[in-house]
Structure formats: C-alpha cells, structure tokens
Image (cartoon, grey):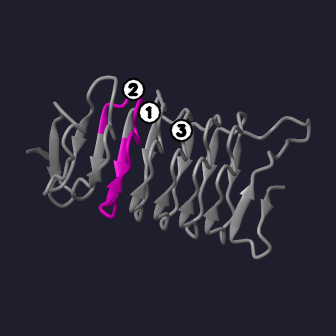
Amino acid sequence: GSLFTADGKNLVHYIPQEDPYGKPLPYYIVPEGVETIEDSAFESSYSLKIVSLPDSLVTIGNRAFRNSGLQEISFGKNVKTIGDFAFDGCDLNYVNLGESVETVGIYAFHENESLQTAVFPSTVKSIGEAAFYNCTGLKSAYFEGDAPAMGANAFCCGEAPSLVAGYNILVSYGTISGLKLYSREGRSGWTEL
C-alpha cells in the first residue's frame, strides 16, 4: 500500500494498488485520519484517475498530484490549504473545493486544459499567482462568498471565464479583465453585478 507516517496522519507516497490481474486501479480513497498529503505524494501517477479525500484532511502539499492522470477529485469538508502546483498538469474538468479551503497556492491548477468549472467556498481568502493559468477550457468560476484576493494572472489565457461571486469583489489590477461578475443571495439564482 501507500506510505504513511507512523501515526497515520501524513500520506507520504502513493503506491498504486492493483487489481487481481496486475493492472493499476484508476481510483484511490485516502483513508480517514489522514490530515496531510505530503509534497509530491501522487506526482506523476499517470494511471490514477479518481481520488476521494477524507473529512480529516486539512493540507494538500506542493506538487501533491502534479502531472498525474487525475480527472476527478472529491474534497473533504476540512481541506484548508492547497499547495503550490498541487494539481498542475492534471486532467480535471470540474472542481468543487469543498467547504473550508482558505488558500489556493501558486500554479495550483495550472494547465488543467479540460477544466470547465471551479467552485470556491465562502472561506477562500487567497488564490495564488497563475493558479488557473492555461486552463484554456475554463468557462465559469463560482465564489460562494466574496471573491478573494488574487495573485497576478490567477485566471489567465483561453477565453475569459465568467466569475461568479458575492459582494466586495477584490480583484488585483491586471489579474482579471472582461469578466462577468455575479452575486448570490441565499440559495436562489445568481444576479449579475
């Protein structure tokens, strides 16, 4: 199996599981109790397509899933930090960052060319430089609360996506241009600002 720290709280390195015929399984469920996925733990795991993260997880390290074959991920309720380059070069098409994410690192979702939609919880405070750079298929980014502070080129290249956010839009100069911004009151529809 995969390598963990002695207390089981840190996933250090992913070792692909195999079916009875020796073929790598395309999915992995990170065990409940894991709080941190270490830097590069799943990096270049090409056969990995689907990952489920536990509610115990708080931190996703730098380059954690970089250049893996990841197409689908479900975030647990308590992930607070997504490290630099964490999902760089993956093949995700939809991302819902769960309920607790506060920080999205630089280049975190860089070059996820299939990514079409990203949903951010109201807790997100910052999105790093070029976090969604070269996500050429990105059409929509939804913020459940106010749009956070964003680094340079946080959303860049391809067609400009629609950004959907709460009140008090905080956009750094030069980061986003020509985007439609929306707010949401309660659980009803979105209203263009």
Is the Cβ of the residue at disc 3 closer than 8 Å to that at disc 1?
A: no
For label 2, the residue is 137
Tell me, yes or no, whether the two marked residues, 1 and 2, touch with CB atoms within 8 Å: yes
First-in-chain label (3 vs 2): 3
Element marked by disc 3: loop
Q: Which residues are magenta?
A: 118-140
Nearer to us of marks 3 and 1 is 3
Say which amino acid is labelled 2: Gly
Q: Position of residue 5 (x, y in %)?
A: 77, 69
Give the answer, above or below, for where 57 lies relative to 74.
below
User: Which comes sooner in the sequence, label 3 or label 1?
Assistant: 3
Query: In the rendered image, which quarter is residue 44 located in?
Result: top right
SS at mark 1 in the image? loop
The residue that mark 1 highlights is 115
Residue at horizontal 80%, vertical 73%? 6
Coordinates of residue 81 in the picture (x, y in percent): 48, 61
Residue in the foreground of this view, choosing between 36 and 116? 36
Quadrant of the image containing the N terminus: bottom right
Q: Residue 88 bears which disc, if any?
A: 3
